[in-house]
C-alpha cells in the first residue's frame, strides 16, 4: 500500500498506520506540533525552578524564616507557584514543587520543605 508522508509528501510503503517516510520526518512533524507554546512553557518552568532553588537555599533543613526582601533580592517571583495548601487551622502555604512558604507578620515568611515524597 502506498501512502504519502505527512511532512514531505514522499510516497512510501509500510504498515497501514505509518504516517512518515523516515524518522527525520516524524521528528520534524512532532517538533512542529509541540513548538506553539514551547517558549512560554520553557520560560515558566525555568522561573519555577529558579524559585525552588531560592527556597531550597534558604531552607536547607525542614523549616526556615526569611524576609520578603531577601526573597525579592534573590529574584524570587511570588506570582509563580505550583500549588496552594490550606491547613486545618486556616493557614495558606504557597508551594513551588516541594518547598512552600507561609506569610507571617512584619514581612517575614516561613519556608518549609515537604518531605512526603522523599523515599
Image (tube, helix red, strand yellow):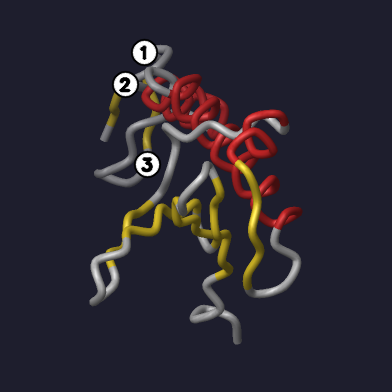
- Label pair 2/1, CB-CB below 8 angstroms: yes
Question: Residue 14 location, x and y as percent?
Answer: 37, 41
Is residue 19 or residue 43 the one in the foreground?
A: 43
Name the residue tied to disc 2.
4
Name the residue tied to disc 1.
9
How packed is label 2: few (under 14 Cα within 10 Å), some, or many (20 or more)?
Answer: some
Precedes in sequence: disc 3 or disc 1: 1
Q: Indicate which label's residue lies in the foreground, 3 or 1.
A: 1
Residue pictured at 39% horizontal, 21% vertical: 37
Q: Is residue 72 left or right of residue 80?
A: right
- Mark identifier at residue 14: 3
Element at label 1 = loop
Distance CA(mark 3)–CA(mark 2): 11 Å
How packed is label 3: few (under 14 Cα within 10 Å), some, or many (20 or more)?
Answer: few
Is residue 44 or residue 75 the one in the foreground?
A: 75
Residue pictured at 43% horizontal, 44% vertical: 81
How packed is label 1: few (under 14 Cα within 10 Å), some, or many (20 or more)?
Answer: few
- Label pair 3/1, CB-CB below 8 angstroms: no
Q: Is residue 57 left or right of residue 30?
A: right
Residue pictured at 36% horizontal, 13% vertical: 9
Q: Is residue 108 left or right of residue 88?
A: right
Distance CA(mark 3)–CA(mark 1): 15 Å
Amino acid at each position: 500500500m502506498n501512502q504519502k508522508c505527512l511532512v514531505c509528501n514522499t510516497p512510501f510503503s509500510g504498515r497501514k498506520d505509518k504516517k512518515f517516510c523516515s524518522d527525520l520526518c516524524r521528528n520534524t512533524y512532532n517538533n512542529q506540533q509541540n513548538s506553539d507554546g514551547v517558549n512560554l512553557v520553557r520560560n515558566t518552568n525555568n522561573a519555577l525552578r529558579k524559585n525552588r532553588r531560592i527556597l531550597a537555599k534558604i531552607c536547607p533543613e525542614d523549616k526556615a524564616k526569611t524576609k520578603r526582601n531577601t526573597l525579592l533580592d534573590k529574584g524570587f517571583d511570588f506570582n509563580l507557584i505550583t500549588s496552594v495548601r490550606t491547613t486545618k487551622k486556616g493557614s495558606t502555604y504557597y508551594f513551588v514543587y516541594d518547598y512552600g512558604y507561609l506569610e507571617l507578620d512584619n514581612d517575614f515568611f516561613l519556608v518549609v520543605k515537604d518531605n512526603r515524597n522523599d523515599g
